[in-house]
Image: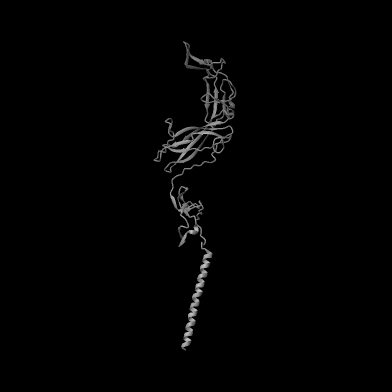
Amino acid sequence: RYGVDYDGSGSFAAADVNENVKVVVNSSGAFSITNVNESSNSPTLVTGGQGALQFGPHNMNFNITAYTDEKGTVSTNDAFTKIFKGLDGSFPAGNQVKQSELLKLSAFSAGLEIYDSLGSKHTLEVQFVKQSTTQDGGNEWQMIIRVPEPAEINTTGEGPNNIIVGTARFNNDGSLSNYNPRTINFSPNNGAAPNQQIKLSFGTSGSNDGLVSSNSASTLTSQATDGYTSGNLKPDAIRVDDKGNILGEFTNGKTFAVAKIAMASVANNSGLEEIGGNLFKVTANSGSIVVGEAGTGGRGEMKTSALEMSNVDLSRSLTELIIIQRGYQANSKTISTSDQMLQTLIQLKQ
């Protein structure tokens, strides 16, 4: 309002003041400007003995081509200037009202679930707000990270304890340039461990595997977290995998290996001594037992819920069967011979 050189003198003067210009952002988000054709008196600007200065109306002309940040850095943005095209051109003093298109802030929020050391779930809200265009044609967004109180993530001593502010920068091809912070120091203040490190993984610099910038509406396509809430072991959901891991399923939907079955091997399996009941004994010929994980070091894998087929040595079993059969036949001959001798003895008596 006070920075326009209306008289073309090249410097600021009282004649450059136009107090009757009204700039309003209406409820719809549009800029509404009125250049009232009235004079005004300023009680704060007086001349010696002449009282307050009087300021008259001015005709104006708009041509919005860029915008500046708080440091005065000029940035161009076609979408931004297009919104204010309705203000361009002559704007004489009067009751005319000029209005821009609706100004929509480029912002996007996403809620990320995190878990403390007690398994309690917390929501980490991340809000992205468009800031400016970078020198290489990319863009920069402000990243506002917030957690519900009484949790704390801000350890600087400045500002709210539950809010930190960072940045996310994108290259001119839309790929992620860098972002900050990458790690958050999280203290839930609910009895869980303080100063827990929460790692933010928003993508690889120079690639499109995470955050990307494009000329489309912001959206969240996927998110993942490696934290989880607390849970109890389901007693009827325990199984063993082929590596010998005893896997337990918990009520929080997670499955973990709660134990592991060791498997032993020897250098010479044929040197083991059979002691019955499918049990074998280590001997000097077999070598010492080497304990390890199933499926490694020449060891076999474990099978669960499977019916074991016969492990009998057929050639040995057939040989033993033949020996038993021959023994039975020999015993039968002995009985037959004894019977014949008794019959001969009876005949001699007669």
- Of residues 162 and 217, the one nearer the viewer is 162
* Residue at 49% over, 39% down: 111
- Of residues 134 and 126, the one nearer the viewer is 134
Instruction: Give the side of residue 269 with respect to residue 91, left or right.
Output: left
Residue 317 in the image: x percent, y percent? 51, 66
- Of residues 318 and 130, the one nearer the viewer is 318
Query: Residue 24, can we see it?
Result: yes
* Residue at 47% over, 85% down: 345
* Residue at 52% over, 70% down: 322
- Of residues 77 and 234, the one nearer the viewer is 234
* Residue 80 in the image: above or below residue 15: below
* Residue 88 in the image: above or below residue 251: above
Residue 145 in the image: x percent, y percent? 47, 35
Query: Residue 237, can we see it?
Result: no
* Residue at 50% over, 73% down: 328
Residue 117 in the image: x percent, y percent? 42, 42
